[in-house]
Image (spheres, helix red, strand yellow):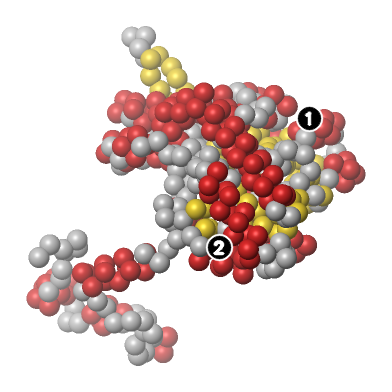
Amino acid sequence: MNHRYLPMTEQDQKEMLQAIGVQAVDELFSDIPEKVRFQGELAIKPAKSESALTRELMQLAAKNADTKQYISFLGAGVYDHYMPTIVDHVISRSEFYTAYTPYQPEISQGELQAIFEFQTMICELTGMDVANSSMYDGGTSFAEAAMLAAGQTRRKKVLVSEAVHPESRAVLETYAAGQHIEVVTVPQTNGITDLTVLKGLLSDDVAAVMVQYPNFFGQIERLDEIEALAHDVKSMFVVSSNPLALGALTPPGDFGADIVVGDAQPFGIPQGYGGPHCGYFAVTKKLMRKVPGRLVGETTDDEGQRGYVLTLQAREQHIRRDKATSNICSNQALNALAASVAMTALGKKGITEIARQNFQKAHYAKQQLKAAGFEVIQHGYTFNEFVIKLNKPIKEMNELLLEQGIIGGYDLGRDYEELSQHMLIAVTEQRTKEDIDTLVKELSEHA
């Protein structure tokens, strides 16, 4: 019989105990007082054989609703997008799949070049000068941007829009607590940042103004107006952005953003129950020595041949952690590679076309829902997400939709008390006209 793990017989155990000079396993715990040791049996099911356990786990997995068998309208930061087949083929190659920190450039040129290409494409999408080799995810990228801004400006307050993803704001709060930075939330009105309130909150002690584009509700923020307000008090302007949307939207760099962050999940990275993902981090040239994480640069060797190396970082970033300017040392190189392969396979025209389909299909869904009598909450343009109001709890509606093979939208009442019966619907390029019409039909029947 084949075993995934080496089995241990009673004889094996006996020989191991003899080798270390003890008679029984209990002797290994002799330093722990008996009164604090657990007595009795753990309240868990008895152990099963490998084959029986595998069968049980497969049965449990079969209960999950996935986007191969269900029509999904769930987004809220993790999206069902087209993944070119070539992505899995490339990232499954052993030289990429097993690669770690490329400290030795002479044996890591493939990995370093792949990271360099990722950085280059992120800069092209965001309109920024420099991008790093990736962060853990969009939320940590967002928080790291606030830490950079606070360190650069020597100020201890950041203003963050309520229309930024709630989980990103939660990560920011965690980071800020340790650095004694005050986080002030700017309220949203009709799904968009209230600029009147923002203007009143700005002062010379604000390190950064942080918004999302498109925001959590799918709406397009007025970056030109927000940039002017932020820079008027010499605060930094931080934008969290869906990189796919930048295939059709004006990039934040063109609006004068100082830092642009986000999650590369829309490009070639599976939804995977919410992770792992890949955050990106891009800045203006004057901030390139403050960038957290790794940065790969292009150079030439003594024979004039092109090569790639880690660059522009203090060694403290990796070893003397108490002197480091950031809390990240590793990164998501494999997922960054997946994003790079997806972006390369799609090309500039392909990314733009997919972004346009997200706009157009979401617009069609809004039109059909309005025609069916639903209230669509929006202020201006949206990308691939929008909010509708229902007459019953979203959880109840989603259970009904699931019975019809549809994964419904996000329950906004989980994060916004005033939106308890509001659903955030995501319509990506994967959804067909028939999918959208089916959603409208089922919502109408159960509303």
Mark 1 nearby-residue class (10 Å; few <14, some 14–19, many ≥20) = few
Please report whichever mark, 2 or 1, sits nearer to the chain's N-terminal start. Answer: 1
- Against 246, residue 361 (above or below) is below
User: Horizontal and vertical percent for residue 255?
Assistant: 73, 27
Q: Which mark is residue 132?
A: none
Q: Residues within 10 Å of mark 2 (few under 14, many from 20)?
A: some
Disc 2 and disc 1: Cα gap in Å? 40 Å
| Residue at the top extreme of this rendering | 304
Q: Report whether 343 appears left or right of 252.
A: left
The percent coordinates of residue 160 (x first, y second) are 74, 47
Mark 2: which amino acid? Leu
Foreground pick, 112 / 185: 185
Which numbered dot is residue 401?
2
Q: Residue at x 85, y 41 (%)?
A: 195
Disc 1: which residue:
224
The location of residue 94, given as percent across then percent down, is 27, 39
Quadrant of res 397: bottom right
Q: Nearer the viewer, mark 2 or mark 1?
A: 2
Q: Position of residue 383 (x, y in %)?
A: 65, 39
Left or right: where 273 falls relative to 216: left
Q: Quadrant of residue 46?
A: bottom left
Residue 8 seen in the current view: yes
In depth, the one of 257 and 163 nearer the eye is: 163
User: From this viewpoint, is residue 288 visible?
Assistant: no
Q: Is residue 431 above or below residue 388?
A: above
**Going 21% across and 69% down the picture, which residue do you hit?**
51
Element assignment for label 2: helix
Q: Residue at x 80, y 49 (%)?
A: 190
Callout 1 amino acid: Asp
- Check disc 1 and report its element: helix, strand or loop: helix
